């Protein structure tokens, strides 16, 4: 009789336990903290293939990706990264505000002069493993507001100079930004379990064994 009561209470407890929201599920996953010297060795090395890629395979900047406040992902990043907060008007229209583009140390007062850069570009993500993902996972990747390194507000000229290139082909024009950039690149790849090709890994390793070896790398595996 006591055993039946215990089983009944356990079942009741389970029925009353709410399902984890995506944010709660993310919070339940421990954050990994290491150095660039160690993190570079955690990347799987695989040749990249772009067959079948289309930017439309990643639904991005979608309204209400995380918040139902009328702001799309681009606006949420601008609000989060502002050094001086913009005013948020009807329909999430932004006015005022200031930003610092860390790729080139440019202070920007016009949100329209900024691009939101996917730290690991969508095409590079496709090459590195996202081609096998579901459409829902690619959408989550393209609108990843849960990891500050995933999306970054930078000047349009630096974002467009970068395009879909990896660190073997492009680094920020500001040398002082290189360690941060490479740590965030590697953190994003580890977060989403993306691979690196040999040339990319070699380029990162030059810094990971030198001036950036002690740069912290923090990432939480994506749900």
Image (cartoon, rainbow, N blue to C red):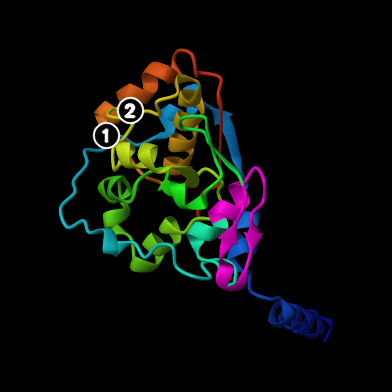
216 on left or right of 40: right
Q: Quadrant of residue 189?
A: top left
Could you tell me which residue is drawn at 56 percent across and 58 percent down? 76
- Percent of width and height locating residue 168: 29, 27
Element at label 2: helix
87 falls in the magenta region: yes
The residue singled out by tag 2 in the image is 201
Q: Which mark is residue 197?
A: 1
58 on left or right of 65: left
Q: Nearer the viewer, residue 207 or 5?
A: 207
Could you tell me which residue is drawn at 44 percent across and 15 percent down? 209
- In the displayed structure, 219 sits above or below 28; it is above
Residue 92 at least partly seen: yes
Q: Which mark is residue 67?
A: none
69 on left or right of 192: right
- Percent of width and height locating residue 160: 32, 42
Task: Please provide the residue range marked out in magenta.
Answer: 77-97
Q: Nearer the viewer, residue 97 or 29?
A: 97
- Percent of width and height locating residue 83: 65, 42
Residue 146 at least partly seen: no
Q: Quadrant of residue 11?
A: bottom right
Tags 1 and 2 in contact by the CB under 8 Å rule? Answer: yes
* Outermost residue to the top: 210
116 falls in the magenta region: no
């Amino acid at each position: 009789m006591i055993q039946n009561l215990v089983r009944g209470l356990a079942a009741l407890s389970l029925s009353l336990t709410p399902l984890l929201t995506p944010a709660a599920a993310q919070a339940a996953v421990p954050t990994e903290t290491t150095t660039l010297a160690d993190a570079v060795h955690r990347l799987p090395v695989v040749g990249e293939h772009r067959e079948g890629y289309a930017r439309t395979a990643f639904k991005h900047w979608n309204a209400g990706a995380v918040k139902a406040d009328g702001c799309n992902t681009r606006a949420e990043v601008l609000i989060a990264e502002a050094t001086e907060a913009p005013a948020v008007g009807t329909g999430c229209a932004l006015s005022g505000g200031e930003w610092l583009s860390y790729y080139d140390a440019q202070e920007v007062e016009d949100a329209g002069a900024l691009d939101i850069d996917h730290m690991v570009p969508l095409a590079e993500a496709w090459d590195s493993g996202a081609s096998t993902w579901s459409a829902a996972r690619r959408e989550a990747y393209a609108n990843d507001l849960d990891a500050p390194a995933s999306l970054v507000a930078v000047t349009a000229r630096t974002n467009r100079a970068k395009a879909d290139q990896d660190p073997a082909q492009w680094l920020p024009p500001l040398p002082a930004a290189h360690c941060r950039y490479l740590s965030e690149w590697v953190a994003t790849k580890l977060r989403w379990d993306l691979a690196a090709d040999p040339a990319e890994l070699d380029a990162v390793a030059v810094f990971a064994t030198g001036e950036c070896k002690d740069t912290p790398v923090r990432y939480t595996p994506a749900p």
